[in-house]
Image (tube, rainbow, N blue to C red):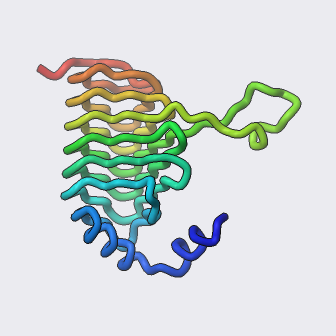
């Protein structure tokens, strides 16, 4: 762990980080959220980050649009492929968005030592992601989609789709 990360995680109080993000982006970050101070992280104006959310953008860009809402207990991590969340997105409680994956192609090397890959994640504008949903590296969710609770999104959801399941499959279209 780098010295900068250690200082930020253990020595800078949450209310200071909340104040920094309010001044920088005019967004609201709960002092009980764990949001990295990273040049890779951009949070849109009017966005709300609730308590007990963890946002990690050490190794890649993480862009959150304007007026998004991220509910309690979410985990969002970006890597080289980037994670983008559009304007007016609603991310329900305990959603996990992970923009990195382990490599596992070699049997002679432990998985933890093979490194990672990152395709990135794109979440469109005006998207509602239900509680407990997991969004895996490489997922693309189009504008105006709804992903029902406890789903797993690993592929592409076309705009205006309502999806559910593990893996998430379209069940309806918004009209």
Q: Nearer the viewer, residue 84 or 174?
A: 84
Q: Position of residue 171 (x, y in %)?
A: 28, 18
**Side of 2 where 73 appears, left or right:** left
Residue closest to the far left: 175
**Side of 25 where 122 appears, left or right:** right
Q: Give residue 128's quadrant in the image.
A: top left
Quadrant including the C terminus: top left
Q: Residue at x 52, y 73 (%)?
A: 8
Q: Position of residue 12 (x, y in %)?
A: 47, 79
Quadrant including the N terminus: bottom right
Residue closest to the far front: 39
Q: Residue at x 45, y 45 (%)?
A: 96
Q: Position of residue 84 (x, y in %)?
A: 36, 40
**Side of 54 where 112 appears, left or right:** right
Above-or-below relation of 97 to 151: below
Q: Position of residue 59 (x, y in %)?
A: 55, 50
Q: Residue at x 41, y 50 (%)?
A: 94
Q: Nearer the viewer, residue 79 or 98?
A: 79
- How many numbered dots are placed on residues in this image? 0
Residue closest to the far right: 108
Above-or-below relation of 144 to 25: above
Q: Residue at x 37, y 78 (%)?
A: 16
Q: Give residue 88's quadrant in the image.
A: top left
């Amino acid at each position: 762990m780098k010295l900068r990360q250690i200082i930020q995680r253990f020595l800078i109080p949450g209310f200071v980080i909340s104040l920094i993000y309010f001044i920088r982006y005019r967004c609201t970050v709960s002092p009980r959220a764990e949001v990295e101070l990273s040049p890779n992280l951009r949070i849109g104006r009017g966005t709300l980050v609730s308590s007990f959310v963890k946002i990690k953008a050490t190794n890649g860009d993480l862009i959150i649009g304007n007026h998004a809402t991220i509910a309690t207990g979410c985990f969002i991590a970006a890597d080289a492929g980037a994670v983008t969340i559009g304007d007016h997105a609603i991310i329900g409680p305990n959603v996990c968005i992970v923009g990195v994956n382990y490599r596992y192609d070699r049997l002679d090397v432990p998985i933890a030592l093979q490194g990672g890959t990152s395709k990135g994640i794109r979440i469109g504008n005006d998207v509602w992601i239900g509680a407990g949903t997991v969004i895996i590296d490489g997922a693309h969710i189009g504008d105006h989609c709804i992903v029902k609770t406890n789903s797993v999104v690993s592929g592409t959801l076309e705009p205006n789709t309502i999806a559910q399941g593990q893996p998430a499959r379209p069940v309806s279209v918004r009209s």
